[in-house]
Amino acid sequence: MRPACRPERGSYEVFEGTDRNRIDSDQRVAKGYCMNRCVCAGCDEVFGKKRVRKDVKRYHDEGLPGTTKILVTELERLGVTGKTLLDIGGGIGLIPLELLPLGVTSAVSLEASATYLTTAKEEAERQGVLSRITFQSGDFVSLAGNVGPADIVTLDKVVCCYADMEGLVTLSADRAQSLYALIYPRDIWWVKFAFALENISMRILGLPRYYVHPTAEVERILHRKNFSKVFSRYKGRWQIAIFKRDSDKESSSSNKSSSKATAQT
Ligand SMILES: C[S@@+](CC[C@H](N)C(=O)[O-])C[C@H]1O[C@@H](n2cnc3c(N)ncnc32)[C@H](O)[C@@H]1O
């Protein structure tokens, strides 16, 4: 059975006759872009109890998946102490669970799947960090107007579940004050082929499809938002990328040069 909440015909109406690319992020929220579109429709069908139980078991037995481990390690290297975190589509909450003990002060965990969110709360309680995480349920693109900024924003394998990559990346980058980290599919032929095969079974099962969005498009949005890439690595079908806000780079380099100057005087 198809999920009840599939993209509806006519749900693009708000932008009829306009150039989508010229609509800024606040307009997207104000105009209710994606409000009825529900492109992460079926999150609970795809990421239901069975999948969630599997994720929890794997985390307890094996620790972090390799890609997430790389992301967490690099974020730690770039500095997380005293920072706040917004984790979008975090599943069982691996990134907050790992970064809070490393010095992140507080986290917001925003997740479209109710099953994942319930389990994320249980895991946070088990690890004694529940009081430091605020949980928000729903589609980030629809809720973005009610989501505050954070020093670090993370999206671990989320962009591949969402059709409106531009809306998701634009709005989430707007909330990142310092670091923006994401794991998403490499857009090369064999990864596209692998996801295309998976999409055939998703279609047969009546579930939403995955997306391999163009890397150049994701990076174009982030550069436009004044982010520069500071880390990138491939692992299997995934790319792990971390971007730093340019103002933040400038202030840290000017801090460094002023402390150098102070040291020289
Ligand atoms: C493939 S899972 C990855 C979960 C987790 N990050 C991990 O790596 O284990 C994608 C997650 O993103 C969530 N998601 C997708 N689009 C979203 C959106 N627009 N807002 C909030 N959550 C979203 C889904 O509900 C799902 O839990």
Image (cartoon, grey):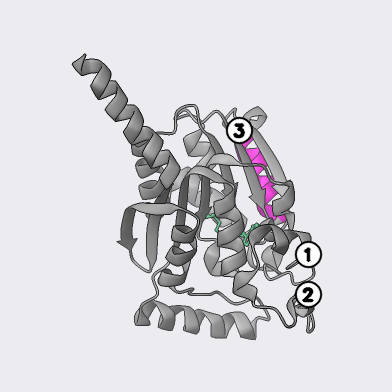
The location of residue 259, given as percent across then percent down, is 29, 22
**In which quarter of the view is residue 171 placed?**
bottom right
Per the image, the residue denoted by label 1 is 32
Q: Give the range drawn in magenta.
A: 114-126
Question: Do the CB atoms of the residues marked 1 and 2 lie less than 8 Å apart?
Answer: yes
Q: Distance between the residues labelled 1 and 3?
A: 37 Å
| Neighbours of disc 1 within 10 Å: few (<14), some (14-19), many (20+) | some
Q: Distance between the residues labelled 3 and 2?
A: 44 Å
Farthest residue toward the top?
Answer: 265
Q: Where is residue 125 in the image (x, y as percent from the top left)?
A: 64, 32
Closer to us: 118 or 175: 175
Residue at the location (77% across, 59% down)?
A: 30
Characterize the local packing of mark 2: few (<14), some (14-19) or many (20 or more) Cα atoms within 10 angstroms: few
Residue located beneath label 2 in the image? 14
Judge from the rendering whether residue 33 lies leftward or rightward of residue 226; answer left or right: right
Give ligand 1's quarter of the image.
Answer: bottom right
The quadrant of the image that shows the C terminus is: top left
Which residue was labeled with disc 3? 126
Q: Regarding mark 2 in the picture, which secondary structure is present there?
A: helix
| Disc with the residue nearer the chain's start (1 vs 2) | 2
Q: Where is residue 204 in the image (x, y as percent from the top left)?
A: 63, 86
The residue located at (45%, 51%) in the rendering is 181
Vertical arrangement, residue 241 with respect to residue 212, above or below: above
Which amino acid is tagged 3? Arg
